[in-house]
């Protein structure tokens, strides 16, 4: 699955990486009333998002460009709650990009 979100404020991958590391885990855990561990890795304009306790390997890739943020996954076998995690990540990105 791939989701594209307009980069209205022109957020760089470095800025988004910092925001994700600082705020996303708290946002996610409040929304899901859970204690989910989240890990991030940034390589140039790509941010990899992992939920090591739930999904083996990288769960989502975020590609940042001047025009848009593209969220994709290469998980062919969805884990429990992966749709809920994806929805919360998309909502968080939209909230922080608009």
Image (cartoon, rainbow, N blue to C red):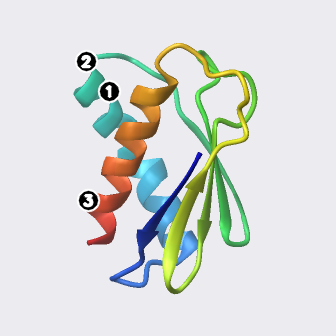
Location of residue 3 with respect to 97 vertically, above or below: above
In percent of the image, x 73 and y 40: which residue is there?
74
Quadrant including the N terminus:
top right
Q: Which sits in the foreground, 18 or 75?
A: 75
Q: Please determine whether, in this image, residue 4 is positioned above or below residue 33.
A: below
Quarter of the image for residue 50 reads top right
Give the Cα distance between marks 2 and 3.
Answer: 19 Å
Q: Which mark is residue 95?
A: 3
Contact check, label 3 and label 1, Cβ < 8 Å: no
Asked if 44 appears above or below 49 in the picture, the reply is below
Judging by the rendered image, the residue that carries numbered circle 1 is 29
The answer to whether marks 1 and 2 mark residues whose Cβ atoms lie closer than 8 Å is yes
Q: Nearer the viewer, mark 3 or mark 1?
A: 3
Residue assigned mark 2: 33
Report the residue at 45% width, 52% height from top: 20
Which-is-in-front pick, marks 2 and 3? 3
Horizontal arrangement in the rendering, residue 33 relative to residue 2 (left or right): left
Left or right: residue 27 compared with residue 85: left
Q: Which mark is residue 71?
A: none
Location of residue 68 in the rendering, given as x and y in whole percent from the top left corner: 49, 76
Which residue is rendered at x = 31% and y = 49% of the image? 91
Q: What is the quadrant of the C terminus in the image?
A: bottom left
Residue pictured at 30% horizontal, 63% vertical:
96
Packing grade of label 2 (10 A; few <14, some 14-19, many >=20) is: few
Give the mark nearer the N terminus: 2 vs 3: 2
Q: Image check: 91 left or right of 40?
A: left
Question: How dense is the environment of label 1, judged by Cα within 10 Å: few (below 14), some, or many (20 and up)?
Answer: some
In three-dimensional space, the C-alpha distance between marks 1 and 2, rounded to whole angstroms, equals 5 Å
As helix, strand or loop, the secondary structure at mark 2 comes to loop
The quadrant in which residue 73 appears is: top right
């Amino acid at each position: 699955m791939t989701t594209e979100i307009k980069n209205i404020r022109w957020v760089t991958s470095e800025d988004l990486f910092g925001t994700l590391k600082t705020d996303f885990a708290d946002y996610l855990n409040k929304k899901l009333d859970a204690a989910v561990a989240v890990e991030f890795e940034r390589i140039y304009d790509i941010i990899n998002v992992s939920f090591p306790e739930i999904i083996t390997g990288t769960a989502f890739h975020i590609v940042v460009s001047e025009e848009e943020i593209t969220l994709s996954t290469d998980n062919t076998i969805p884990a429990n709650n992966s749709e809920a995690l994806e929805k919360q990540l998309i909502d968080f990105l939209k909230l922080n990009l608009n």
